Amino acid sequence: MGKCVWTDPVHGEYRCALEALPGKTLCILHDAEEKDLGEFKRRLYAQIDCVGPEDERNPQFDFRGYVFPEGIRVGGARGEKDVALPKAMGGDVNLMYTKIQGDVSFEDAGIGGSAYFTDSKIAGDTNLRGAEIEGHTSFWRAEIGKDVNFQFAKIGRDAYFMEAQVEGNATCGGSRVLGGANFWGAKIGGDANLSGAKIGGDVSFWDAETGGSANFRG
């Protein structure tokens, strides 16, 4: 077996450190076919817990290109079906190019850097209600199969939703964004609610579409 061949299509300096599955070119974390959930979690939690040689695991919260057979949440027991991440994570959390076959819940999470969901595909809901993110938050070109919720979230820099596709509602009421918020070209199937939001920089909805109402009250 050789190393997994997955590389970041934009940031070419990243390459997966894991061994490829037998007879394949990708590792269990990047392979898109049906996989052993127990082994998937074992390898993923070894990465999160920084277990094993550093050159044989990827950076702690860098999940670029992974294919999650279940959802992701913060907090709770690891024995449940969803992948459980720590409630507090220092530095960036990178979920660019991921495919997640369930919900994503970062409710009340604390992230010491930026949260990247660029080009991700999330089958279910995406919940960042009450999360505190010190850096940027990016859902650029993300595809979300249900609702996205940013109620009362605090984002220390910019929020990017350019060209994102949300099948359901986008709820950002009461959120605090110290930088700008860019929804350029976004497509929201339901309602867009920014009531009571406070945004420190520019806001753009240029060429955005919503299938329901848009609420900017307050």
Image (cartoon, grey):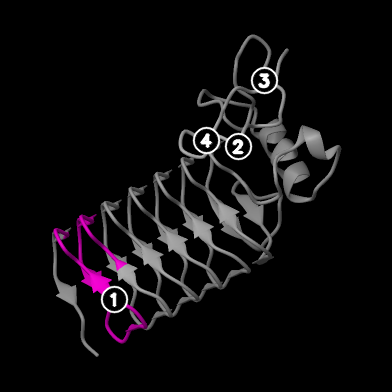
Give the residue at mark 1.
202
Label 4 or label 3, whichever lies nearer to me, is 4
Predominant SS along the magenta part: loop
> Label 4 sits on what residue type?
Asp
| Residue 193 counted in the magenta span | yes
Image position, residue 62 (x, y; %): 62, 47
Work out whether residue 83 can be spotted: yes
Q: Amino acid at mark 3?
A: Ala
The reply to whether the C-beta atoms of the residues labelled 4 and 2 are less than 8 Å apart is: yes
Residue at (19% x, 66% y) in the render: 205
Of mark 4 and mark 2, the one earlier in the sequence is 4
Q: CA distance from mark 2 to mark 1?
A: 32 Å
Q: CA distance from mark 4 to mark 1?
A: 30 Å
Front in this rendered view, residue 186 or 41: 186
Q: Which mark is residue 20?
A: 3
Instruction: Say which of 138 and 168 sits in front.
Output: 138
Q: Nearer the viewer, mark 3 or mark 2?
A: 2
Looking at the rendered structure, the kind of residue marked 2 is Tyr
Circle 4 is placed at which residue position?
8
Vertical comparison of 19 with 207: above or below: above
Q: Earlier in the sequence, mark 1 or mark 3?
A: 3
Left or right, residue 6 beside residue 144: right
Label 3: few (<14), some (14–19) or many (≥20) C-alpha neighbours in 10 Å: many
> In this orientation, does residue 122 appear?
no
Q: Which residue bears the numbered disc 2?
A: 14
Q: For the residue marked with disc 1, what is the amino acid?
A: Asp
Distance of mark 1 from mark 3, alpha carbons?
A: 44 Å
**Would you say the residues marked 2 and 1 are in contact, meaning their CB atoms lie under 8 Å apart?**
no
Q: Magenta region: which residues?
A: 182-208
